[in-house]
């Protein structure tokens, strides 16, 4: 692995927390992601199932986990299954985890080969009453792919139709939404790498460079600092492209007088950072650009102060920040008082210029799991990313930092990354 990971205590604690949530005589089964074919005999890079990684720290394909805290056989209460290697696999793919290595990394003592999985499933299904299966449940997901965990759930229910089947995802969402100190450390490493990449591109950006050249500079800095890569497809959007929220073509030339919006984040040990900055291509904001930039920045400063215990996340995203943004849009002359007075509460007028939410969970996924109607609790990590998009002016500005909810004031995990317009201009002037 590129990254360093010595957190067996974290993964053991995560399993204990899950066991505490399971009803008596319950079995939980988790499987690694598929290795997806690309074309011919090629495959897409493997990315571990986030829940399986959260419980084991194992980042290898064809890995399975059984958790059965009440199993009458003590040796089958926690069992991790690995891919059995051989000389041919070692020659073509390199070494795989040994059983002692997996035991040290995960803290699980019972390590078996995955060709033993079916036989042991048959044994534990004879004892268990409730079976918790893990599917990819996210309210933004529209899935048409029969992935491994879904196929397994269908097959198991056909083989053992009389058990009580339960959803594991809600329990995992509950657990993963609160970050342990070790997880915050890993997120912090992803953020530190992301900061290095941002500072690098500030000295690179100038009129005439291509968006993909900026992306290349970011990627270079990520990989040289042991990131696994990008936590998501980076957005490098110059000029009017910044008004396309999920612009990922990154194939246009950056022009003198335009801004370039960069939304990117490193992934380290499967944990994500998520940063957005918008900077002037020539190093200096125009008066109008600065006016809009400062408006977005004021919204960001006010919004992140609201990310504290007791705040309702849905209300924060749909109402609280909207009211702050509405005032800024009035000040900019983009909204008129009569529009605001007569607006439809179900479709507020500020959404013409700010059409996305302000915050989402962050962790093992960039859009991490968590209940969007939840009341915020200490240990949750969110993005804070207001933006103003004015297509008629070819102007889009978004700013984004990652925020930790605490018992007191929210902690900006990206507070050290340049954000103020004057600082951006000063750093770019050193090119």
Image (tube, rainbow, N blue to C red):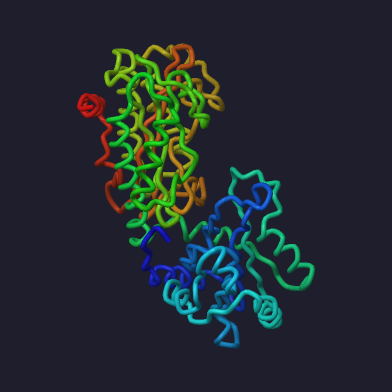
Which residue shows up at 44% across the image and 73% down it?
12
From the viewer's perspective, is 381 left or right of 344? left
The furthest residue to the bottom:
73
- Along the line of sight, the residue nearer the viewer: 41 or 254: 41
Q: Nearer the viewer, residue 422 or 81?
A: 81
Residue 410 makes an appearance in the image:
no
On the rendered structure, is 140 left or right of 283? Answer: right
**With respect to residue 111, does 89 lie above or below?**
above
* Residue occupying image coordinates x 44% and y 69%: 11
* Image label count: 0
**Coordinates of residue 85 in the picture (x, y in percent):** 58, 73
Q: Quadrant of the C terminus?
A: top left
- Residue at 45% x, 45% y is 230
Residue 260: where, in percent of width, then height? 39, 24
| Residue 190 % position (x, y) | 36, 50
Residue 423 figure quarter: top left
Left of 161 or right of it: where is 327?
left
Q: Quadrant of the N terminus?
A: bottom left
Residue 239 in the image: x percent, y percent? 43, 19
The residue positioned 50% from the left and 69% from the top of the image is 95
**Above or below: residue 228 compared with residue 116:** above
**Could you tell whether 277 is left or right of 147 in the image?**
left
Is residue 114 shown to the viewer in this render? yes
* Of 381 and 329, the residue lying toward us: 381
């Amino acid at each position: 692995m590129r990254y360093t990971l010595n957190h067996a205590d974290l993964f053991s604690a995560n399993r204990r927390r899950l066991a505490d949530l399971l009803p008596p005589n319950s079995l939980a089964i988790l499987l690694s992601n598929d290795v997806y074919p690309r074309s011919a005999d090629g495959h897409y890079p493997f990315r571990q199932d986030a829940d399986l990684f959260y419980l084991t720290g194992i980042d290898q394909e064809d890995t399975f986990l059984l958790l059965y805290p009440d199993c009458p056989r003590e040796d089958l209460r926690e069992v991790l299954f690995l891919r059995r290697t051989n000389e041919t696999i070692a020659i073509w793919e390199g070494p795989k985890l040994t059983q002692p290595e997996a035991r040290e990394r995960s803290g699980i003592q019972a390590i078996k080969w995955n060709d033993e999985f079916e036989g042991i499933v048959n044994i534990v299904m004879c004892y268990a009453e409730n079976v918790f299966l893990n599917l990819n449940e996210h309210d933004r997901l529209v899935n048409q792919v029969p992935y491994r965990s879904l196929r397994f759930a269908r097959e198991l229910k056909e083989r053992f139709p009389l058990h009580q089947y339960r959803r594991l995802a809600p329990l995992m969402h509950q657990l993963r939404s609160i970050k342990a100190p070790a997880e915050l450390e890993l997120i912090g490493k992803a953020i530190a790498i992301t900061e290095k990449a941002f500072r690098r591109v500030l000295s690179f950006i100038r009129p005439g460079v291509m968006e993909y050249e900026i992306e290349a500079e970011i990627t270079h800095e990520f990989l040289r600092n042991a990131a696994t890569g990008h936590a998501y497809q980076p957005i490098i959007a110059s000029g009017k492209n910044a008004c396309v929220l999920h612009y990922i073509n990154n194939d246009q030339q950056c022009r003198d007088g335009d801004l370039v919006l960069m939304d990117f984040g490193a992934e380290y040990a499967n944990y994500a950072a998520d940063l957005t900055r918008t900077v002037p291509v020539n190093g200096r904001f125009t008066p109008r650009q600065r006016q809009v930039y400062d408006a977005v920045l004021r919204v960001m400063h006010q919004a992140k102060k609201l990310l504290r215990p007791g705040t309702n996340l849905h209300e924060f995203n749909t109402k609280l920040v909207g009211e702050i943004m509405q005032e800024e849009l009035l000040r900019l002359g983009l909204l008129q008082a009569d529009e605001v007075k007569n607006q439809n509460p179900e479709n507020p007028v500020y959404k013409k210029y700010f059409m996305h939410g302000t915050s989402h969970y962050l962790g093992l996924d960039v859009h991490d799991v968590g209940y969007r109607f939840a009341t915020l609790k200490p240990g949750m990590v969110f993005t804070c990313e207001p933006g103003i998009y004015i297509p008629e002016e070819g102007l889009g500005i978004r700013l984004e930092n990652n925020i930790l909810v605490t018992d007191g004031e929210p902690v900006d995990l990206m507070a050290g990354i340049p954000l103020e317009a004057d600082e951006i201009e000063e750093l770019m002037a050193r090119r």
